[in-house]
Image: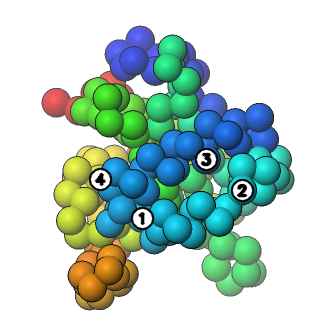
Amino acid sequence: MLLAETPIAMVRRLTAYDGPALWHLRNEALERDPEAFELSVDEHWRTTVSSLSEGLRRSSDWDFFLGAFSGIGLMGCVALSRNRLERTRHRAVVKGLYVTGSMRRRGVGQELLVNLLKEAEVLPGLGQLSANVPATQTAAIRLLTLLGFEQSGREPDARRLEERSLDAVHLILQLSPARLASAPSGPPA
């Protein structure tokens, strides 16, 4: 998809070819904003580019990354991971949203999420998305809420960064094709 309102040239699913760029973008994310993610920098460094590329090669409608690209390359990503158990496969988790620093507040994160929601809407049997966001990540919570997610709870001490305890806000979105027709597009006001 080509976008005129943002600095994005294209949003698409990431492939094995994108493994090196994704590895470096995730490393930047974990170093710049460590409390936003469950994975630590040390854990990320134990992940090889080739294993990440292999995971992207095996991606499917059950697990995939979307990437936002511009003239600078991969500048943002978000992932969807669907539950595999029979009783919970109607649910999926949105995770790993990150936009490189120079492209923040320009609508990139919103475009990534809108594209992810459009893909999720057409996946057979998928009816609900969730996200667990550290309570300190107010911009992400605000963006998810703008796109229709509703807060369903708060988990105290959901993760720890060194000796700091971080709460997480749990957000839920019930999918419906009509909801996406009215989803906002372009940079947030």
Whether tag 3 and tag 2 are in contact, CB under 8 A, the answer is no
In the image, what residue occupies the spot 34% across and 51% down?
32
Q: Along the horizontal axis of the image, is 145 left or right of 113? A: left
Residue 37, percent from left and from top: 42, 64
- Helix, strand or loop at label 1? It is loop
In the image, what residue occupies the spot 52% across and 37% down?
115
Residue type at mark 3: give it. Trp
Quick check: can you spot residue 153? no
Sequence-earlier tag: 1 or 2: 1
Residue 68, percent from left and from top: 52, 31
In the image, what residue occupies the spot 32% across and 36% down?
101
Q: Along the horizontal axis of the image, is 26 left or right of 155? A: right
Neighbourhood count class around disc 3 (C-alpha, 10 Å): few under 14, some 14–19, many 20 upward: many
Residue type at mark 2: give it. Thr
Residue type at mark 4: give it. Ala
Sequence-earlier tag: 4 or 2: 2
Q: Nearer the viewer, mark 1 or mark 2?
A: 2
Quick check: can you spot residue 19? yes
Neighbourhood count class around disc 2 (C-alpha, 10 Å): few under 14, some 14–19, many 20 upward: few
Residue hosting label 4: 140
Neighbourhood count class around disc 1 (C-alpha, 10 Å): few under 14, some 14–19, many 20 upward: many
